[in-house]
């Protein structure tokens, strides 16, 4: 258990979803996207490149966010986007939980994205 406290959960791991969270989370997303080592990976329909099926926001050894449209879930879109991380022999941190069990070498740390950016200010 992490002993650090953040404005999102107070160290409890239960995320607060009120206005304070939303303000802080918008800034957090902007900070993540502004980093030079952040990658946005986009999966498009093979017959229509203008149709986005899903996306992932990643950094070195960290997966911040993954989203796949509901009607194309469970067909390998996320697996394709995250292949370099899934196949990595190193531990990979992920900061948001989904409905799918991550590989054993994925380590959940929702504080990673928050504290990493607090310390660089």
Image (cartoon, helix red, strand yellow):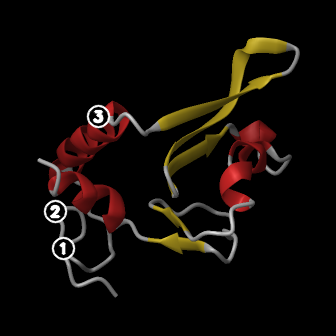
Question: Element at badge 2?
Answer: loop
In the picture, measured across the screen, residue 77 lies left or right of residue 104, that is right
Give how far across and how far down residue 23 sits, in percent. Answer: 18, 42
Give how far across and how far down residue 59 sits, in percent. Answer: 47, 47
Q: Residues within 10 Å of mark 1 (few under 14, many from 20)?
A: few
Tag count: 3
Q: What residue do we see at 81% from left, 51% from top?
A: 74
Above or below, 73 against 71 in this view is below
Q: What residue do we see at 72% from left, 47% from top?
A: 78
**Residue 94, labelled with which disc?**
none
In the picture, measured across the screen, residue 11 lies left or right of residue 89, that is left
Do the residues under discs 1 and 2 have CB atoms within 8 angstroms? yes
User: In the depicted view, which residue is nearer to us: 15 or 114?
Assistant: 114
Q: CA distance from mark 3 to mark 2?
A: 17 Å
Counting residues from the N terminus, which is met first, the one under dot 3 or under dot 2?
A: 2
Q: Residues within 10 Å of mark 3 (few under 14, many from 20)?
A: few
Q: What residue do we see at 48% from left, 71% from top?
A: 108
In which quadrant is the N terminus drawn?
Answer: bottom left
Give how far across and how far down residue 28 sits, in percent. Answer: 27, 44
Counting residues from the N terminus, which is met first, the one under dot 3 or under dot 1?
A: 1
Q: Residues within 10 Å of mark 2 (few under 14, many from 20)?
A: few
- Residue, disc 3: 30
Q: What residue do we see at 71% from left, 60% from top?
A: 86
User: In the depicted view, which residue is nearer to us: 39 or 73?
Assistant: 39
Q: CA distance from mark 3 to mark 1?
A: 22 Å
Question: Element at badge 1?
Answer: loop
- Residue, disc 2: 7
- Residue, disc 1: 10
Above or below, 22 against 96 in this view is above
Q: From this viewpoint, is residue 67 visible?
A: yes
């Amino acid at each position: 258990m992490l002993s650090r406290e953040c404005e999102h959960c107070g160290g409890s791991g239960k995320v607060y979803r009120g206005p304070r969270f939303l303000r802080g989370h918008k800034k957090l997303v902007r900070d993540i996207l502004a980093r030079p080592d952040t990658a946005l990976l986009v999966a498009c329909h093979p017959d229509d490149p203008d149709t986005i099926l899903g996306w992932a926001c990643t950094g070195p050894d960290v997966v911040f966010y993954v989203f796949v449209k509901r009607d194309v879930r469970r067909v390998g879109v996320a697996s394709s986007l995250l292949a370099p991380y899934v196949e990595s022999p190193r531990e990979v941190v992920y900061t948001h939980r989904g409905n799918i069990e991550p590989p054993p070498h994925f380590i959940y740390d929702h504080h990673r994205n928050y504290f990493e950016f607090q310390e660089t200010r």
